[in-house]
Image (cartoon, rainbow, N blue to C red):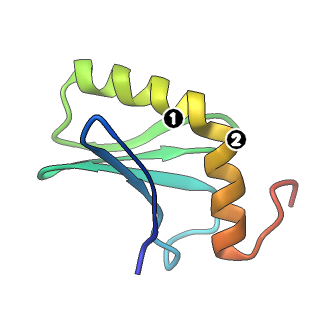
Amino acid sequence: MSPKFKQEEGFVFRIFSNEEVRMHIHVVKAENEAKFWLEPQIELAENFGFTNKDLKKITKMVENYGDEFKRLYAEHIGRRVDD
């Protein structure tokens, strides 16, 4: 089960713990999904269906909540943020 970390403007932010260990977050809305790396810096990893306009909005959200997402990711996975 992947926890929902946040939901804003219809975008749902969650992780899937059975993926790679590099901190990341998935953003889902309807049938669209994007994956963002949270380390070493926030950047788009993959995009499936979001428009450039949506990606700009999502990127700002991920940047705004980046520290919170890192903390929540570490709590969920059992890893310290500075590992």
Q: What residue lies at 56% left-to-right and 69% top-to-bottom?
A: 20
The residue at the far right in this view is: 82
- Depth check: give the residue in front, 63 or 19: 63
At x 26%, y 26%, the residue is 54
Which residue is at a point 58% across and 28% down the rendered structure image?
64
Q: Looking at numbered disc 2 in the image, what kind of residue is underneath it?
A: Asp
The amino acid type of the residue labelled 1 equals: Val
Q: Position of residue 14 (x, y in %)?
A: 43, 59
Measure the alpha-carbon separation of dots 2 and 1. 9 Å
Which quadrant, please, contains the C terminus?
bottom right
Tell me the quadrant of the picture where the N terminus can be found.
Answer: bottom left
Q: Nearer the viewer, residue 43 or 7?
A: 7
Residue 22 in sight from this viewpoint: no
Q: In terms of sequence position, does the residue under pointer 2 or pointer 1 come before the other? A: 1
Q: Name the secondary structure under disc 1.
A: helix
Residue at the limit of the structure toward the left, as seen here? 31
Q: Position of residue 4 (x, y in %)?
A: 42, 62
Residue 4 in sight from this viewpoint: yes
**Residue drawn 46% across the image and 69% down it:** 3
Q: Which mark is residue 20?
A: none
Q: Position of residue 11 (x, y in %)?
A: 30, 43
In this rendering, the answer to whether 9 lies above or below 83 is above
Residue behind mark 2:
67
> To which residue does mark 1 refer?
62
**Is 68 positioned to the left or the right of 16 in the image?**
right
Residue 32 higher or lower than 59, as above or below = below
Circle 2 SS class: helix
